Amino acid sequence: MVRMNRQESEEIVRQLWKSDAAFFWECSLPDRRVRFSEQAKGVIGRDADSLEGELDRFFAIIPPEDQTKILGRLDAVAQGVKRRFRCCHRVMLPGGGFRWIVASGRPVSWDADGKPSSLAGTGMDVTALRNVRSALRVMESDIVSLVHSVGDCVFVLDRSGRILDTNEAVHCFVGADRASLRGRRLESIVHPEGHASVERLLRESRVREWQEELPIAAAEGAPRYLEVRMIAGVWGNRSVFVGVGRDVTRRREAEAGLRWRIEFEKLIASLSSTFMFADDFAHAVDRALADIGRFYGAKRVSLHLFGNVRDAECVSEWLDEGMPSFRDHATLPDESFEAVLAKILRNGSLILPDVSAMPPSPERTLLIRLETASMLCVLVFAGKEPAGVVCLSSRMQAKTWSEQDLPMLRIFSDILGNALVRESERKRLREDEQRLTMAIVAGDSLLFEWNVPSDTIRVLRGGRLGGGRLLQDRVYSMSEWRRRIHPEDRERVWTKLQAHLDGHVDDEGYETEYRSNIAADFASGDPAWLWLHSRGRVMERDEAGKAVRVMGIIMDISRRKAVEEERGALLDRLRVAAETDVLTGLRNRQTFERDLRRAIVADQGEGSAFCLVMFDLDDFKIINDTRGHVAGDGVLSYLSGSIRKHIRECDAFYRWGGDEFAVFVRGTPDDAMALARRTLDLIRSLPKEHAGGIGASFGIACHEPNESAEDLLRRVDRAMYAAKRNGGSRIEFA
């Protein structure tokens, strides 16, 4: 037998003492002293300190007949007859009555002779369990009646898994009468994917309570799910399992949809980062189309950019193995694709659930030639102008696109449209940089030689600086040259030059930029400060190591500096464009996700409490369907502008996507509720010609300590959709 050392025993004691499952006790055998953990108070009803000490203090609350039983079993362990202590006994409560306790433990230390010197273990309240046993035996007939009256599925199994009885709910759920179910094994009505769970139940038959979601086989289609809670008990003289099952099929479907949405949001965040930081835009587009195709289970994802409103060129494409390419038809001809483009431009999207079922047409012929079974297309906007189309295609068999596929794909098209705008800005920026490079290359410079002992500078080769001309062989004094340097730059430039002259840096030379009006003598008009780039090197030193001759070049970089300032301003504009929704001018989804992470960090670190309000416009699709997407965009723009005027400066307003919006509310739940009510009243009161008489469904959730962004979004999303399910134009608090 392997015996634990002292360190191992002490570690077991420490772990048990921390346990919240029950209360802990420790007993010294030689002196019969006991102590209890603080959890004992909740079970015994007395402070642990009041019971600690001689065993007789504890026995004062134990019935005499149970005392004898406890002592006998302690002695059995002390003498080595039993290796473990286990005893079920009663504890009298201060207010009367008693509780049944199961105390179990084992030796944790031994004396020099190898006999146990102390025990440690746990005590658990089993009163309820004993009461249940008694009640089951007394009320067996009542249980039978209950089985047949409750609305949930109830069934009784023997320990081998055979069905002894069921209620009518099981008959309705399974589609078989009670008589035909009796005697059958539980696996016969469970879908194969749930057989392992049933086997585990039967294998672990000593477990008193067991809970699992079981897939129930359906006559056709996917299985339906029961959340089953199984309890071991007695039925007459037989040991049985009594199971209660609730239909959770719809809940699982909702959870699956939520998981899908979370994964899509992760994908969208990844794609946004890809476009934001990509050096190669074309490669980023190819990668994005591939990720979208794999996520949707499509066989081809293509991006078509408009040459005009009658044709579109496939500029990027992801293909699953063997799928024909749109690029074989680089520019789709008018007669084959014009009708498709017209529908997309008119509606903003197009769903072709089954290409083979389309009436004969040039576009049908083209799509069949490209082995397209079904297609989902969404319009891409660059700014407010249609720029192209993203198309998802299936092959061989038609694909049923779900209701959430279209709005989710529109989110991707918005990201792609914003990326097209940014890429256009980057292209213009690159062109500016190229022009800047050409200007630097073509710009004149001057070559100089500085005679240090004589303190003179000679221009060996002169050029234009600031519009004037420095003539070759022009000679200056260094003091004059230094005086012409801008006062703010003078000390910095001279310090760097002097360090090189003194040999404090290597002989590779010096390089610096500064402002000077050295060209004022030669330029027409008012002298202006020019930005100059100077690079030079000591070419000769005397025997003492002092610099004698310095040569270098000076270039006019004023235009480059101007372009750099312009570039900085352009980058600022790009940053704003990346963080702003093009249609509404609100902060976009990417900015929301960044701000949410920052807000959670601030709440955890500084206690900056906040709430999240999300709302979805009710019946907005009617506006798009009846008045067109241009009118719908106008409604979104007008509505968001109106709401923004009523948002507090300390709060932040975002367009989540489509017709969904979000608001960060700094403050209490009351502040969030007040904002939601103001916003709902405002939406209801907007002129019908602008808002179409629509409403909105609101969800509110306040951030809880240590809550993740995903969990907070999940709560507020559930609240918002609960408001929509309950009729809309209402507010639900998570």
Image: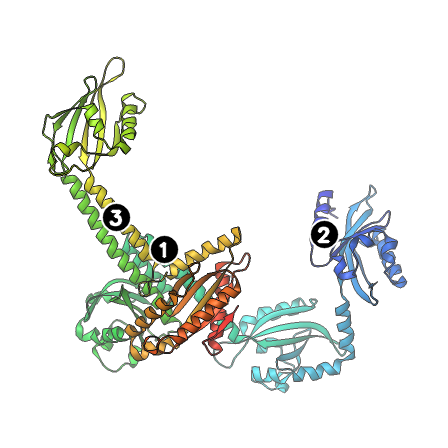
Q: Earlier in the sequence, mark 3 or mark 2?
A: 2
Q: Position of residue 661 (x, y in %)?
A: 40, 67
Q: Please report the residue visible at 54 percent of the width from the left and 60 percent of the height from the top.
A: 704
Label 3 amino acid? Arg
Q: CA distance from mark 3 to mark 2?
A: 66 Å
Above or below for 433 versus 465: below
Q: Is residue 575 above or below residue 255?
A: above
Say which of 346 and 501 sits in front.
Answer: 501
Residue at point 71%, 83% (across, down): 144
Residue 567 numbered tag: 3
Q: Is residue 75 visible?
A: no
Q: Position of residue 565 (x, y in %)?
A: 25, 45
Question: In front: 3, or 630?
Answer: 630
Which dot, 3 or 1, sits closer to the camera? 3
Q: Residue at x 36, y 68 (%)?
A: 642
Instruction: Identify the residue at image location x=61%, y=76%.
Output: 245
